[in-house]
Amino acid sequence: MLALVFVLTSPVAGAQDARESFADGLFRAARFDMRSGNYAMACPKLEESYRLAPASGTLLNLAVCHEKLGHDSTAWTYYVRFVETVSPDDERVRFARQQVDALAQHLPRLRILSRQASSDAVLYLDGVQLRAASIGVDIPVDAGEHHAEMVWSDGRRARATVEVKRDQREDIYLDAPLAPPVANRSPPLNHNQPIFHPRFRPVVSRRHGRPLRTAGLVTSGIGVLGLVSAAIFSAVALTKRPIVSLHCPRGFCDDEGLRVAGEARMMLRAADVGLVTGATGLLTGGVLLFDAWKPSPQLLRSETACVATFSKSF
């Protein structure tokens, strides 16, 4: 029987010993940081040490550490907890009570007020949820910026931020915004817009006009090249006119005049082809670009539904 009790209790005792060992190591590291003046690193270690193995010495050091960081409210809370925890005969109680009285005179305090508080509203102060009884009560807080929020059951929210300094008391007013009025009738139907099925959601797509835009730009470019080539061929043909006049007096041409006249006619034919091609390309490109810009009904497939929608395709 004794062996069974030993087997059942030894793991629990071992786990407790391990927690106390971890807590002692954290406490010693925190005390080293405090002696070095590094209170910002010491306080978290003391809090973890106290969580693993609550001890009055750790609690008193926590109060001193937060007081050094200027966290008067947190330090005051730990001092009060220490006084309530240890025996009145403890020699450290006198020091703790002196600190409690000294800090209480300078504690920053925050009061949350609301004219629309209700039992269904949820109150948060710096992310901590509070009950309705906290409204209108002076709450000791550390000096600095604090955020308050109240959430009503209908989804309305009220938020406020205030900065509290030492020896000050600040009020935060949280009043719910007015609920949006309920429309008594449906808005007039716009026949220029499509009607969507309630279970579908409209999807806007911009892919439809891309092929048209590309084709329009390419065709317009070909048209511009055609007009440019027509202008070049026409200019070259005009430069040959003086040569033809020189070698073809009175309508009779020598060999050089016939050759130059033939080249001029070929240039003019090429200019005609370029002119026709350019005009056709510009006209076709303009039509394609206009269609790419024009809103048009499309059948679009989304991840959840297939719907009809109007969108600018370009």
Image: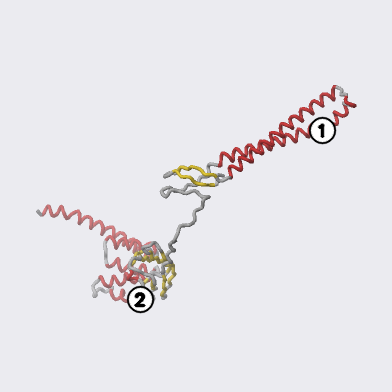
Q: Nearer the viewer, residue 148 or 27?
A: 148
* C-alpha separation, residue under disc 2 versus residue under disc 1: 105 Å
- Horizontal and vertical percent position of residue 6: 14, 54
Looking at this view, name the residue that lies furthest to the right: 250
Q: Which of the 4 image quarters holds residue 211?
A: top right
Q: Residues within 10 Å of mark 1 (few under 14, many from 20)?
A: few
Q: Which of the 4 image quarters holds residue 63?
A: bottom left
Question: What's under tag 1, amino acid-wise?
Answer: Thr
Closer to viewer: mark 2 or mark 1: 1
Specify which label sits upstream in the sequence, 2 or 1: 2
Q: Residue at x 82, y 24 (%)?
A: 259
- Horizontal and vertical percent position of residue 95: 31, 75
Q: Residues within 10 Å of mark 2 (few under 14, many from 20)?
A: some
Whether residue 161 is situated above or below residue 249 in the rendered picture? below
**Residue under circle 2?**
104
Say if residue 193 shows up in the picture.
Answer: yes
- Colour scheme used in the picture? secondary structure
User: Which SS class for mark 2?
Assistant: helix
**Residue under circle 1?**
239
User: Which SS class for mark 1?
Assistant: helix
Whether residue 275 is situated above or below residue 2 in the rendered picture? above
Whether residue 58 is situated above or below residue 232 in the rendered picture? below
- Horizontal and vertical percent position of residue 176: 41, 67
Disc sitting over residue 146 in the figure: none
Say if residue 42 shows up in the picture.
Answer: no
Question: What's under tag 2, amino acid-wise?
Answer: Ala
Q: Nearer the viewer, residue 257 or 296?
A: 296
Looking at this view, name the residue that lies furthest to the top: 255
Q: Which of the 4 image quarters holds residue 158?
A: bottom left
Looking at this view, name the residue that lies furthest to the left: 1
How many marks are shown on the rendered structure? Answer: 2
- Horizontal and vertical percent position of residue 276: 70, 34
